[in-house]
Amino acid sequence: MHHGVVASRSADSSSSRHGNSSSPIDAVSLAIIEQLQEDGRRPYAAIGKAVGLSEAAVRQRVQKLLDQGVMQIVAVTDPLTVGFRRQAMVGINVEGDLDPVAEALTAMAECEYVVMTAGSFDLMVEVVCEDDDHLLEVINKRIRALPGVRSTESFVYLKLKKQTYMWGTR
Amino acid sequence: MHHGVVASRSADSSSSRHGNSSSPIDAVSLAIIEQLQEDGRRPYAAIGKAVGLSEAAVRQRVQKLLDQGVMQIVAVTDPLTVGFRRQAMVGINVEGDLDPVAEALTAMAECEYVVMTAGSFDLMVEVVCEDDDHLLEVINKRIRALPGVRSTESFVYLKLKKQTYMWGTR
DNA sequence: TTCAATAGTCACGGATTTCGCAGCTAAGGG
DNA sequence: CCCTTAGCTGCGAAATCCGTGACTATTGAA
């Protein structure tokens, strides 16, 4: 992520409550993000009215947030309704350097989510597959075949109870 | 998610081959979704040109996909840049019925992701917190205090390597 | 202090997009 | 066969988007 520094609007200095070096986001941009988390296609003018800014200012801030990689506006689908019926979280233990393994996992289309962790797993990966055969192939043939992978443990999803994208909205 | 049945466009009957309840999305809608996964604000006319449909048709299909809950168009942020510096996956073992515990977790703002699993954990939860104190409080004071929770195991995130929202784009 | 230089915002067109509606066609059901 | 439903198209009117130039603080250096 780029660490571009957003000019701090000193007007509302209370905004810098939670953060310092890594908080390039002021309260107004946060409010804009919240608006777009409710509806990614909301018009700039409507957002401006909600956050107290002109349409053009909102547009520029949104563009900057997108350019900086702070947020992205995308369609998010329910995997089940688009044909992916088997999902699993896979915990992985690695021998030696984690990075090459993580890179290889990242390159797999079926791995939606790859994270290095502290604890009894070195890596955790969310795998999204079409069916059981597909899932089996990914885990047993591709993940476990990666050099450095010592062991894996799978947690097949039975029911997804919650999935939000509301970071920063609290 | 709602299980509303999308009217099958018999034009592309190959899609509903063995299809019944779980294949409500035809190829054209999938193409539309892919366009919106690249850019959630892409104009309907541009999408129409890409998928071979009129602007109005794209608009109607997008609206239907949103109404049905098949997809949503939202802003997704990088937790780190918006002030959430500690994340963890928490595996949970439960005594008795899973549902009440899952419901309680779902109600917590810090729990972004709650899923019931098969394997050595009954539930897996992704927790997003501002700092270590916050994380400790959520895990030790709130999650472990829930009635029915027998044990938990935490995997603190060290580095997020991949996070996509490309279901259906493959 | 003074003076650029910079960043952020606003205002205001013209181009583009969105929106609502009417009409058309094909598929099914009675 | 008639009727209904669902989906698509085309077309104006309204709204939105987008580029641009001017204005205002703020910063940093002379």
Image (cartoon, coloured by chain):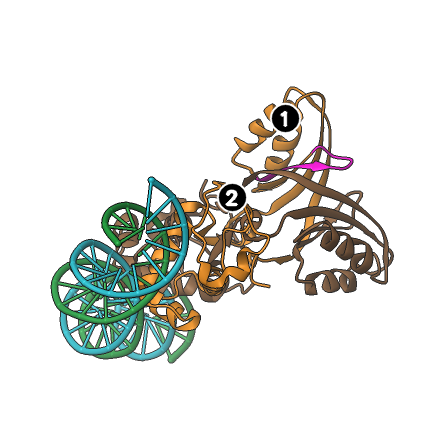
Chain colours: A brown, B orange, C cyan, D green
User: Which residue is pictured at 77% across the width and 43% down the height?
Assistant: A119
The residue at which mark 1 appears reads as B141
Can residue B119 be found in the magenta stretch?
yes
Depth order, front residue of D26/B78: B78
The secondary structure that dominates the magenta segment is strand
Is residue A23 something one can see in this rendering? Answer: no
What's the chain of the residue with tag 2? Answer: A
Left-right relation of C7 to A106: left
User: Which residue is pictured at 74% across the width and 53% down the height?
Assistant: A133
Q: CA distance from mark 2 to mark 1?
A: 23 Å
Can residue A78 be found in the magenta stretch?
no
**CB under 8 Å between callouts 2 and 1?**
no
Q: Amino acid at mark 1?
A: Lys
Residue B138: image location, x then y, percent: 61, 32
Depth order, front residue of A131/B107: A131
Q: In what quadrant of the picture does the N terminus of chain A appear?
A: bottom right
Question: As displayed, is residue B104 above or below residue B39?
Answer: above
Q: Which mark is residue A164?
A: 2
Residue A28: image location, x then y, percent: 36, 51
Q: SS of the residue at dot 1?
A: helix
Circle 2 packing at 10 Å, graded few (<14), some (14-19), many (20+), is few
Please give the range of residues in magenta: B112-122
Residue B76: image location, x then y, percent: 49, 53
Depth order, front residue of A24/B159: B159
Q: SS of the residue at dot 2?
A: loop
Q: Amino acid at mark 2?
A: Thr
Left-right relation of D19 to B64: left
Left-right relation of B114 to B31: right
